[in-house]
Amino acid sequence: MALRNALQRVHPKWPKRNMLQWGGVLAVGVAAVGLRSITSAGIPGSFRVVTPPNYTSIVNTLKAFSRPRSFSAITIPSTSMAITPPQPPPEWTHSAEDVVKLTKECIASHRAVEDKIGALPPSDCTYESVFVSSRPTDDIIFFMISSPQLALEAAETEFESITEPLSFYQNVSPSKALRDASTDADGLVRDYNVESSMRLDVFQAKLAAEKNIKSSGLWEKLSSEEQRLIDKMILEGKRAGLGLPEAERNTLTKLQKELSQVCLEFDKNFNEENVNIDGGIFFWLILPQGVVSFTKEDLDGVPADVISGYTKRTEGSTEVYDVTFKTPDIFPVFKFATRPETRQKAYEGHESRLKINVPLVEKFLGLRREIAKVLKYPTWADYRTEPKMVKTGQGVVDFLDDLEAKLKPVGLKDRETLLGLKKKEHEERGLPFDGNLYIWDYRYYDRKFIETSLELDDMLVKEYFPVSVVVPAIMQIYQSLLGVRFETINGSTWHPDVQQFSVWEKDATDASGFIGYCYLDLFPRESKYSHAAVWPILSGYTKADGKRSYPLAAMVANLAKSTPDKPALMRHDDVVTFFHEMGHVFHGLLSQTKFAKFHGTKVARDFVEAPSQMLENWCWEPEVLTKMSSHYQTQQALSPALIDKIIKSRYVNVGLFYLRQVFFAKFDIKVHTDQEAEDYTLLWNNLREKISLVKSEKPCPGQGSFGHISGGYDAGYYGYTYSLVFASDMYSTVFKGGPLDPARGKLYRDKILKYGGSREELDSLEDFLGRPPNSDAFLKELFGTEATVSASL
């Protein structure tokens, strides 16, 4: 089930430069939410309630969250720091007017750089005049005032450093005005990115500079990262269509701008989970928070502590409970509600919650088909996969077909097992049984099977993972494994709930040991991004004067709130999610590239999940489970017997789970390889029934909440499984014998994290593994065999 958990995880957000390449802001919908996971983590030593140096304040803050209280009242404590960071954290004090004004000024400054470079005669196009400035840029003010003196690399870096924090507000700010301004600013950036990517004069300057560099003999003197920078910048121009005739370039610019705006609208709906309620032919009502309502009888089987967290109201003479579509609220209904009609109503509401996005999906898929034709690519999938490890759309299809064929027999057996449970329960309760396993049955009987076959109670396991223990424990694990330490700081943030840290080398004694900043925004609130993700808000890089500019990574999550009866407890998949996302944080913090363009998670998208997926394996070690857990009442760790059951649950119903993931990936690749539009709601439901082996009654528009296909994983969902091949190989080869060994952590840091995207991903893997990667560990973990796989790796 480590593989299963890896597919649930949410991925880092990317900066929005080169929007045609990335295809929009990354967002994660229901597809990324898994069935279950039983995880934990720990480090050598004896601790259960973790209070390492500098962590007391973290624990106190998280304990405050665990008590019934008002979330807005939390105060983040500060601790004194012996060393002052060489770079202060950014201020989060912008007004709505500031956001738009600064964005416009930033665009104007960057345009001035491109105007200057585009006007250079070919003979004056050099490495320094076009690609990389030699003049130091001390701060953003230099960029805003003196930008024409910069070359492209520095100008892009400063542009990103200014616009990324401003665009981030739309996901987290409690102020609607600021969120709206951030969304508007994001739209300006997207439009400008299209304009910038289509500048023929700048592309010609790049080509002239490359020619001059090579003819002068300078090329051989450049580092491999400097050569890679030039190659990538020129490839971007070619992929943007700058080799096309003017009329086709103009068409492309128009299509790109339209695509970016459609994706922006989809993402705005997704971030705020706007719900479309059909009010007849005269109007549509858009509600900011969707709910589905049930009586107490409807919620039979749902744990009482979960129900106590629902909003209760009176509808006529009936008392009802409003269940939001956020994971901590809706998933217990899927898993525990004994009434099939309750689960069906919850599922259909959840699946239809973003019906408002259905026409937007149709629109952006059509625009992508048009863009691919103009660019002379067979399909959008071929365009998107060209710079990735898989290379072609057909390579994705082959990978998924092969995996589905291997999984289908296992999935059919899993389905028969769950149908047997359903038949027995329906007979005992006098309910009709039609021989079908429905989508709303899946999580319910999956849980029941684990409870009956392993006597493993998911809600009991949850009681061993209070937030106040798990979060600092995971941070301590990373601190020990990767040789770093956290210092709590008290600075400006976008919301009082945010935890703010400076991150240092473990033995740092002066400013040279500074690594960067980490922000944690862990608890739900209205209109906040409703899933889990990491934003690399600031990239690290080496400035022209040799000094470092330091990174900032922010994790946004929605951990369960406390209830009147219990403190804030982390569901099993919440624990895994947090561990996974911290892996993305450290990919961003510990990268040491020269250029921001290659920093951290700016790697091939079918590799980017692999490091964090590998790190999830830590959560299955018995020693780690023991040290991670602490029952919220008794403070006792998980017993050996319970740990054994957790580990045995690892591959339960794995066939059905992975077929579900294959469905998401096949829907994604099909809509991006088809040449004609179709009814995507029917396609969504028909493909799911065929591949996932579960039925539904009425077609629901689940594609409206499939954020991947708007937000950067278009023609890329396959990457979750594809990258698992590398994750399994890395863990099995290097870490299995000592997952908490700091020496192995240093090897991982030096061979994988350090290089970011500054070299080919296969080169980093081979350097880390000591050989080319293979699929043996992946297949052995999934099927218990080392059978070969015909997929393109």
Image (tube, rainbow, N blue to C red):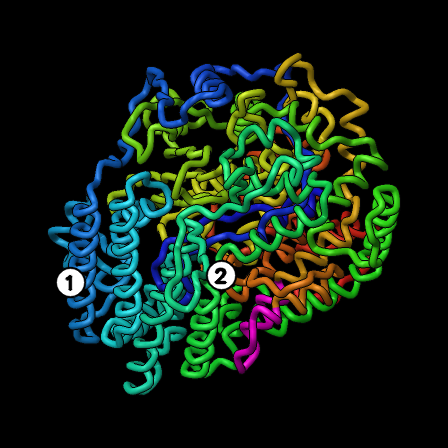
Lateral position of residue 656 relative to residue 303, left or right: right
Q: Which residue is most to the left? A: 145
For residue 355, which numbered disc appears in the image?
2
| Residues in magenta, as a range | 665-683
Give how far across and how far down residue 745 sits, in percent.
58, 34
Q: Residue at x 41, y 57 (%)?
A: 267
For the N terminus, the quadrant is top right
Distance Cα–Cα, label 2 vs label 1: 42 Å
**Magenta stretch containing residue 736, yes or no?**
no
Lateral position of residue 268 relative to residue 669, left or right: left
Q: Residue at x 20, y 52 (%)?
A: 100
The nearer-to-camera label among 2 and 1 is 2
Q: Is residue 449 visible?
A: yes
Give how far across and how far down residue 258 sits, in percent.
34, 71
Q: Residue at x 76, y 20 (%)?
A: 639
User: Which quadrant of the figure has residue 791?
Assistant: bottom right
Q: What residue would you read off at disc 1?
A: 112
Give how far across and how far down residue 386 sits, in percent.
51, 70
Q: Residues within 10 Å of mark 1 (few under 14, many from 20)?
A: some
Residue type, mark 1 in image: Ala
* Residue 21 higher or lower than 489, as above or below: below
